[in-house]
Amino acid sequence: MLYIHKAYSKDVQQSEDLNPLMDHSSLQPIYQIIAQNAAQIDHEGYFPDQEFRLLAECGLLAVTLPGQWLDFAQPKTPELLKVFRMLGKASLPVGRLYEGHINALYLISLFGKTEQKKRWFADVILGKKMFSVWNTQDNEGVRIYDLGNGKYRLQGYKTFCSGAGRIARPLVTGELISPNKKGWQMFIIPTEKVKEIRADSSFWKPLGMRASASFRMDFTGVELDESDLLGMPGDYYRQPYFGGGALRFTAVQLGGAEALLEETHKFLKSLNRTDDPFQRARIAEISYLLETGSLWANQAALNTDNWKDIPGSVTQLLAYINMTRTVIEDVCLRCMQLAERSVGARGLMRPNPLERIHRDLTTYLRQPATDAILTAVGEYVLNQNSTSKLWPEQLNFSENMDHR
């Protein structure tokens, strides 16, 4: 969760099967089932249907909606990131698909009209429908042609469309071609009401994350109504909402690294290698690296909730989130290397879970623009008059020393 324009809490019927007493401890059995089934869904093009039925039944699909445990309008970012971490630890593909669902609901919360929120939130609560965000361009991408009278026709393709064929409400972006307005436009497709969206599964031949079913999709010929368009052109890239979303996927990644530690721990114990001083040193390093990542993620989540009311804090928040994203990527990469050395070739062979987790995390860490993210942090710091107060309400150590 980042900023929210308004809390939307009216006219959405609550489903009886949403658990008002939901907390992290009550979700542990769900996480365990997902983890136990992670190896069975590790196939190209597979979608974790059973897992998302469980998430729907326990209320996690709707958990960020008005009145729910992690309502977007409440300062619950640390708690939400913990859900992402636990799902990532159980299954990185499930965590990735869930993150896309929550991302779409967040954009609806920010930019949806009242009637749109009523309709789309009811799709989640009553219809148990999954959402996702499909933004990655393929060739010329998607264009949205204004046909007049509130009708639009799509043309073009997207790639890396996670959950292809299973997402009932994909949030897609494209270039709006209209006499009245132009730009990068979001829209949500009611899949059961339009012509079939053609999926190209041959595109998806990944090293890892195979069960996320991230296909190439052809939207050519799909027709939409005005009510399917979300927000205004350009809203998708508005900050800090766009850049701040990195916190969600970094939390899933960190959960994958935590799974590496757990499986490495089990493997070494099974071979009675716990007395080896080099193994102890590697396990110690993985442990403190994960704690480092956890502290960064939690602080970034707190900053997200605490800085939202501070005027002019957008650039600081984005810089802090970009640092967090960079640190967690480094943490995950280092943990993978240490785990490899600890378990050797034997531990990286199927059916050992480490082989699958390693592949999935390797693939999921390849997020776009990592170099640009790092240089953006440097640009922010160098644009300040000094480094004594880079962040809102940061303690100025030198000033406190002078007044002791």
Image (cartoon, grey):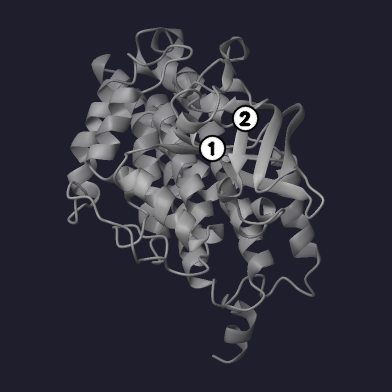
* Residue at 71% in and 53% down: 233
Q: Residues within 10 Å of mark 1 (few under 14, many from 20)?
A: many
Percent across and percent down for residue 23 are 23, 52
Instruction: From this view, report whether residue 198 is shown above or below residue 404.
Output: above
Q: Quadrant of residue 77?
A: bottom left
* Residue at 28% in and 14% down: 271
* Residue at 66% in and 26% down: 221
Q: Nearer the viewer, residue 249 or 155?
A: 155
* Residue at 79% in and 47% down: 178
The amino acid type, in three-letter code, at marker 1 is Ile
Label 2 vs label 1: CA separation? 9 Å
Q: Nearer the viewer, residue 319 or 50?
A: 50
Q: Residues within 10 Å of mark 2 (few under 14, many from 20)?
A: some
Can you see residue 373?
Answer: yes
Q: Nearer the viewer, residue 72 or 269?
A: 72
Q: Secondary structure at mark 1?
A: loop
User: What residue is pinned by disc 1?
Assistant: 189
Relative side of 289 to 277, left or right: right
Furthest residue to the front? 149
User: What residue is pinned by disc 2?
Assistant: 222
Relative side of 10 to 27, left or right: right
Quadrant into which the C terminus falls:
bottom right
Q: How many numbered badges does the structure rendering display?
A: 2
Q: Nearer the viewer, residue 41 or 147?
A: 147
Q: Secondary structure at mark 2?
A: loop
- Mark 2 and mark 1 in contact? Answer it, CB < 8 Å: yes
Percent across and percent down for residue 388 are 68, 75
Relative side of 356 to 174, left or right: left
The amino acid type, in three-letter code, at marker 2 is Val
